[in-house]
Image: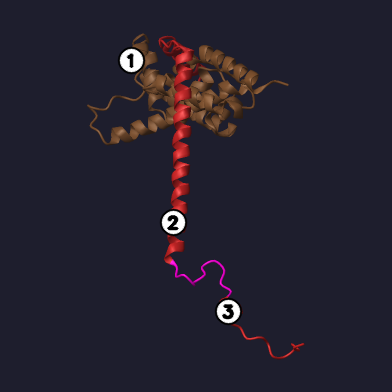
Amino acid sequence: MTSPLMRAVEADEALASIFQTEYAGMVRLAVLLGADDAEDIVAEAFYQLYRRWKKLRGADAAVPYLRSVVCNLTRMRLRHLQVVRKHTTPATAPPPGSSAEAEALLHDDQRALVAALKELPARQREALVLRHWLGLREAEIAEAMGISAGAVKSHTSRGMAALTRVLEERR
Amino acid sequence: MTTPSTEAKLRETLGALAAGIEAAPPAYKRARAEWRRRERRRRLVLAVLVAIVFALADLIGLWALNQTRDHDPIIFDDRSRIHQTEPAIGVIPP
């Protein structure tokens, strides 16, 4: 039988370990999903994890939960930016998900692919990033995005078809 | 029509893009202190809101009771039974 104090210490240690190992990956995920303020999103996601720690099924569920929160917060942020862009002139509004420093190192083809990825609807982009960057299975992607496995298949194939069209047009 | 080359290219591009992103985690202790501060603030705001709603409900109830006349019951009204005449038939006085 573990005391509440022991449980709190264990939870703190587990959270510290997840924070050290997953922070950078979550920031990268947020940037790839198109977030312009990835570090704020990840900080908020870790706060949500801290709040809900007792309600998680176990320590194994922490990373999928974190991933899911990052996806949701990024989607909300992109929607907010779309609304802001509608009400501002193009010159004053920065493009969403600008990761200019990272993009500067890419080849032309890769830059075109990133530009095409940014044009995709948020759900398709999420499905493609989770599938092809994190290499998650359909069920894991469905859990992260809060949709069915069938919907994941649909988003992935539509997104991939759109990217293929863009690449073929460039040839 | 998707091709395996698109998938490979996408994987390579995402990998290259992710590799170019610098992200060092901040100090855990500072981050945890910030989470605790936010949690304390959230609980305080929640407690204040609950207290305000409770106080408002009390005030509204007191105001409603104060609006009634002295001999005008607003919760149970048994005046109809008090002033009702006893049935004449079927009741035999002792």
Which amino acid is tagged 1? Answer: Ala
Question: Disc number at residue B80?
Answer: 3
In this view, B82 is above or below A51: below
Chain A color in figure: brown
Q: Residues within 10 Å of mark 3 (few under 14, many from 20)?
A: few
Residue A24 shows in this picture: no
Q: Amino acid at mark 2?
A: Ile
Q: Position of residue A37 (x, y in %)?
A: 37, 22
Q: Decide whether the magenta segment is chiefly helix, strand or loop.
A: loop
Judge depth for marks 1 and 3 and give the one in front. 3
Viewer-nearest of discs 1 and 2: 2
- First reached walking from the N terminus: tag 2 or tag 3: 2
| Residue at the limit of the structure toward the bottom, as seen here | B89
Name the amino acid type tagged 3: Ser
| Host chain of mark 3 | B
Residue B6 or residue B80, whichever sits in front? B80
Label 1: which residue? A100
